[in-house]
Structures are given as structure tokens and as C-alpha cells.
Image (tube, rainbow, N blue to C red):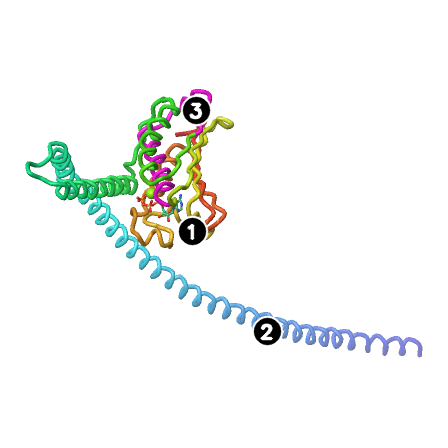
Amino acid sequence: MKSLLAHHVLYYIVLAVPLVLLTYWITRRFSLHKMKRVVMKAEHNYQQQIAALQVQLSGKVNMLESMVEKLQLSNQELNRLNEIRSKFMSIVAHDLRQPLTSIQGFTSVLMMDGVQGSGNEDQLALNNILKATDNMNQLMADLMDISMIESGKFKMDFKHFTFNQLINDVYALQQVNAQKKGLFLVRYEYPHDVTVYADRFRISQVLNNLLGNAIKFSPQGGRIELRYFLQDGWLVCYIADEGPGISYAEQNKIFQKFHQADTERSAKKQGWGLGLSIAQEIINAHNGEIGVQSAGLGQGALLWFRIPVDPSAFEI
Ligand SMILES: Nc1ncnc2c1ncn2[C@@H]1O[C@H](COP(=O)(O)OP(=O)(O)OP(=O)(O)O)[C@@H](O)[C@H]1O
Ligand SMILES: [Mg+2]
């Protein structure tokens, strides 16, 4: 009887085990299949997104390429126009300067000799011709400088010289102009000789423009101060006037080519707005700095520059 029972139990076990295994296998297979489908769907979505992004990206790349192409074309055109402009400026400056110098020379001779039978009016006319040619000559010189700056041919001629001496020369010249306008030009002499290694002609050009501006823009009776001194290896020079001053907004702009502050005085068309841009190039070529200080319109202006006394300490 016992053995019959054991036989039955064994029989059910033998039957149940494969059934359980079969059920386990079927459930597992189905859940795996489901998971696989989910993963595949996610992968599909992901690939679709990547494809959409690729399309978007290639569209942007195409757009960028066409923009770069357009930029290159306009750059080429700009370079071409720039070359024409530089050429034009150098032709104007060179070819007009020669006849101008002849006119100036002959006018001076006529003025000195006095044209036979000429009266005061003729002398006045000759004087006007000379003034006009002087102005034109200055413009030619400035245009030539600008054209050299733009073509990278604006080179400095460095030599040792005594700065005090240069100041004396510039002062003597500008003192005459200041007196003509009823201005007091005061120079503060530095008690020691200052030897600098710089381009004497170009530094005198900077000084003449700064003093010329101070004289040009100051009202009659104004005072102009010219100072220079040594400070930590720098030669510092400044020119202060009691003229109309320069507004804050204009202070950044006056060193730009052809820029003239938008005030009544500029409307009188004195100069071309080139002096300070050339001065800045010159000072930069000396590894120096140039700047302006003015408390605003009507407050006078102080223009300053500094250059290293010993440029070997810097790279030039
Ligand atoms: N001392 C100053 N006082 C007031 N404004 C000044 C002074 N110096 C320069 N400026 C302003 O800066 C502008 C630019 O000066 P910059 O020397 O470059 O040109 P310019 O004197 O007008 O002409 P150019 O120097 O070519 O003969 C001037 O037109 C003027 O508006
Ligand atoms: Mg000037």
C-alpha cells in the first residue's frame, strides 16, 4: 500500500516538473520578447532622432558654407577696393605735391622780390596763394602718411637725440603761431637733459599736431602749457589748453581717421581730422601711449603721450 502511494507521488512529480519548467520557459520567453520589442522601438526612435538631427545639421552646415563663401567674396571685394583707395591716395599725394611745391616756391620768390608795379592787393593775393598751398601741402603730407600706414610702409627712423632740444625747436615754431592768435604758450623746461632713442622727425610731427590743435581750438587770450618729464623710464609729455574741451563721447573717437568732434569749430573746416590718427600710429610705433583728458565741453583739454626712453627694454 505504501509503495503504491510512493509510486503515485513519484508519478505526479515526474508529470509536474516538466509542466512547471514549460510554464517558466513560456513566461520568460514572452517577457524577453516584450523587452526586446521595447528596446528595438527605443532604438528605432533614437535612430530617427539622430537622422532628423543629421538633416538639420547638414542644413546648417550648408548655410554656414554659403555664408563663408559670401564673406570671402565680400572680403575679396573689400581688399580690391582698399587697394584702389590706397593707390588713389598715394597718386594724389605724390603727383599733386610736386606741382604744388613749384607753385609755393614761385609764390615765395614773387613775394620776396615784389612783382613790378604790384600793390598791396597783389601782395595780399600772393599771401593767400601761399597760405592755400601750405594747407594743401599739409594735406598731401598727411595723406601720404595715411597711405604708408595702410600699406605697412610707415617706418620709423630711430636715433638718439636730446628731447629738450626738440622741444625748443617745436616751441620756437609754435610760439609764433600762438602769438598771432593772442595765446600764451608756456613751456616748462625739464632741468636735466633727456636723451631718447626715437624718430625725431615723427615725434616733432606729434608735438606740432598737439600744439597746433591746442592753438587752433583755443579762444583768444587762452593759456597753453607744454610740459615734459621722466617717470619710471618713460618720457612723458603733455599739452594742456583752456579751449572748448572734448566731450566724453568724443574722447574715444578723436584718434580715428578723419574724425572731427561735432562742434561749431569743426564746422569751420579747420584741418581734416588726420593729425591725431597719425600721431597715434607714430606713438604706437615707439611702443608708447597717447591719450586725452578733458572734464567735458568748455573745460579745456589735456593731450598727453609717453614713450620709453630706452626702447631696448621693450621690443621695437
Ligand atoms: N585741444 C583740443 N581741444 C578741443 N578739441 C580737440 C583738441 N585736439 C583735438 N580736438 C578734436 O579732435 C579732432 C581730431 O583732431 P586731429 O588733430 O586728428 O584733426 P584736426 O586737427 O581737426 O585736423 P588735422 O590735424 O588733420 O589738421 C579735432 O577735429 C577736434 O574736434
Ligand atoms: Mg590736428
Hey, which quadrant is residue 154 in on the image?
A: top left
Q: Farthest right residue? A: 1
Residues tagged 3 and 1 counted as in contact (Cβ below 8 A): no
The answer to whether mark 1 is within 8 Å of ligand 1 is yes
Residue occupying image coordinates x 40% and y 66%: 59
Cα–Cα gap, marks 3 and 1: 33 Å
Amino acid type of the residue that numbered disc 3 sits on in the rendered structure: Asp
Residue occupying image coordinates x 93% and y 76%: 2
Cα–Cα gap, marks 2 and 3: 80 Å
The residue lying toward the viewer, choosing from 59 and 283, is: 283
Dominant SS of magenta comes to helix
Which residue is under mark 3?
310
Q: Quadrant of the C terminus?
A: top left
Q: Position of residue 77 (x, y in %)?
A: 26, 54
Hey, which quadrant is residue 190 in on the image?
A: top left
- Of labels 2 and 1, earlier in sequence is 2
Q: Quadrant of the N terminus?
A: bottom right
Q: What's drawn in magenta, residue-wise?
A: 188-217
Residue occupying image coordinates x 34% and y 30%: 170
Task: Locate residue 164 relative to residue 90 in the image: left or right.
Answer: right
Amino acid type of the residue that numbered disc 2 sits on in the rendered structure: Arg
- At mark 1, the secondary structure is helix
The residue lying toward the viewer, choosing from 236 and 220, is: 220
Which residue is under mark 1?
250
Which residue is under mark 2?
37
